[in-house]
Structures are given as C-alpha cells and as structure tokens.
Amino acid sequence: MERVVTDWDQYHRRVRVSQRFLWTVWRAYASLLRGFSFSGPIKIIELGCGTGYHTMQMTRLYPVTKVTLVDFNASVIEDTERRFTALECEKEFLLGDLFSLELNEKYHIVHSQGLLEHYTPDQRKELIRLHRDLLAPDGIALILVPTPSLAYRFWRGLLEKLHQWIYPDETAISRAEFTQELESSGLEILRIQGCHLMEVGAVCRRRPSPK
Ligand SMILES: C[S@@+](CC[C@H](N)C(=O)[O-])C[C@H]1O[C@@H](n2cnc3c(N)ncnc32)[C@H](O)[C@@H]1O
C-alpha cells in the first residue's frame, strides 16, 4: 500500500494553538529526566524539532553551552529560530532531512518526540542509530513515541471518525517493539515509562562496547 505522508504544514498550523499539549509532553520529559545530571554545561540537539519547546524547557533545567535544532520544514525552522532569540548560548538551526544529516559534533542530550512513528521499522532504526551516533560519551538520548494504549486508540479512532486525524503515516509503537528497536540499534535503556497515557518514552545511553 502506498504510504501517505503527514502534511507537516497542516500539523504546525494546528500546533500553534496547542500549548497545553506541549506542556503535557514536557511533564513527561521532566519525569524521564529526573535524577540525570551532568558534570558541566551541556550541548543539546533536537531531531525533528518542531517548536523546539522541549529543548527550550531543558535550558531551564541544565546550564547549556549550545543548542542545535533540526527540521526539514523551512517555516518551522524560521519560527523556532525566532522563539530562541532571547536564549543566551550558541544556537544552530539546521534545515534538512535527518536521513542525510552529517554532523561530527557530539551532544549530552539528543532527543526527539513525535518523529519515529512516521517511519517504517527500518527507518526508525536508522533514526535511533542517528540519536546514538550524536551522543557524547556521557550523553543520553531521550525518545518519546505514541503507544497503542486504550487512550491512544480511543482518541485516534474519534479523530478519524471526525476526519480530524492528520497523521496518515503514524504507527503507534508498543513498549516491547520500542525496547527491541532501541536495544538492537546500539542503545542501552536506562529508563522507560508510559507518558500521559498516549506515549512511551525512554532515556538511553550508547551501549558500552565489549572489552
Ligand atoms: C510531531 S513534530 C515534532 C514536535 C516537537 N516535538 C515539538 O515539541 O514541537 C515532528 C517534526 O519532525 C519533522 N520531521 C519529520 N521527519 C523529518 C525528517 N526526515 N527530517 C527532518 N525533520 C523531520 C517535522 O517537520 C515536524 O516538525
């Protein structure tokens, strides 16, 4: 069957009014990050950054030297750059496709939310490996994806009935499947938990190579 991709322009027009959802997701991020600290100021990269909201929130939790935000939607990157004007640290806004991203820099936090579920299992593993490859030695990757909970299925079913579901390529990912994909892509899971009834989130580090 032909894959119909999400219209990200349509998504971003809608997200401008859903600050409450962003806050709910941030609560999930904060819970995942609880207890993780770093020895000095950190660098953060967000893959498929959208609003960049969660990166901005993290700059209030940790001292930060640099943030990098990547998205392939030009108007999103423009809006996000504007939103980060007041933040005082090095800032980089990259317009481009994650599947061809080439960066040598390493980061203490590599994160994404709402990204993996729009791709096939093989592409998801490629994106997970990208998170892994961008990690500094003491870095952590945070990834949140929707999971097929009762609440998710109910909410999605309702929006589909009302012709309001705008993510034709989205696949909810079970915790077991997510665990398998993370572990088989070279990450070690440090924490994994259900988030706000509809997502599952994980904090991982690069799997130490065998001695
Ligand atoms: C659901 S949104 C992320 C929302 C974000 N977590 C936030 O808080 O605003 C997914 C984002 O990933 C971007 N995206 C999807 N696939 C991408 C790719 N292959 N390369 C770069 N950006 C991508 C989309 O343009 C969109 O902005």
Image: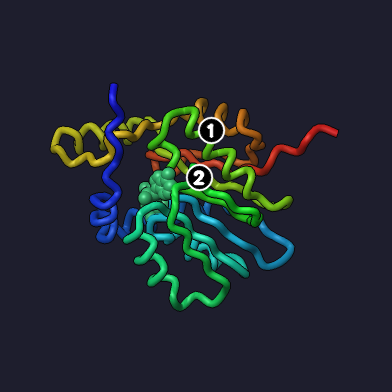
Question: Where residue 89 appears, x then y in whole percent?
Answer: 57, 74
Q: Which one is nearer the viewer's eye here, 75 or 86? A: 75
Q: Label 2 crowding class (10 Å Cα cut-off): few <14, some 14-19, many 20+? A: few
The dot on residue 100 is 2
Q: Label 1 crowding class (10 Å Cα cut-off): few <14, some 14-19, many 20+? A: many
Question: Where residue 137 appears, x then y in whole percent?
Answer: 73, 50
Q: Secondary structure at mark 2?
A: helix
Task: Tell me the quadrant of the picture where the N terminus can be found.
Answer: top left
Q: Which residue is mark 1?
A: 125
Say whether residue 148 is left or right of residue 70.
Answer: left
Q: Which one is nearer the viewer's eye here, 210 or 198? A: 210
Return the residue found at the far left.
162
Tell me the kind of residue under disc 2.
Ser
Ligand 1 closer than 8 Å to the CB at disc 2?
A: no
Question: Where residue 56 appears, x then y in whole percent?
Answer: 48, 65
Say whether residue 119 is left or right of residue 39.
Answer: left
Which residue is depicted at the point 54% across and 77% down? 88
Q: Which one is nearer the viewer's eye here, 76 or 26? A: 76
Q: Secondary structure at mark 1?
A: helix
Return the residue found at the far right.
211
Q: Which one is nearer the viewer's eye here, 203 or 77? A: 77
Residue 169 in sight: yes
The dot on residue 97 is none
Q: CA distance from mark 1 to mark 2?
A: 14 Å
Corner quadrant of residue 73? bottom left
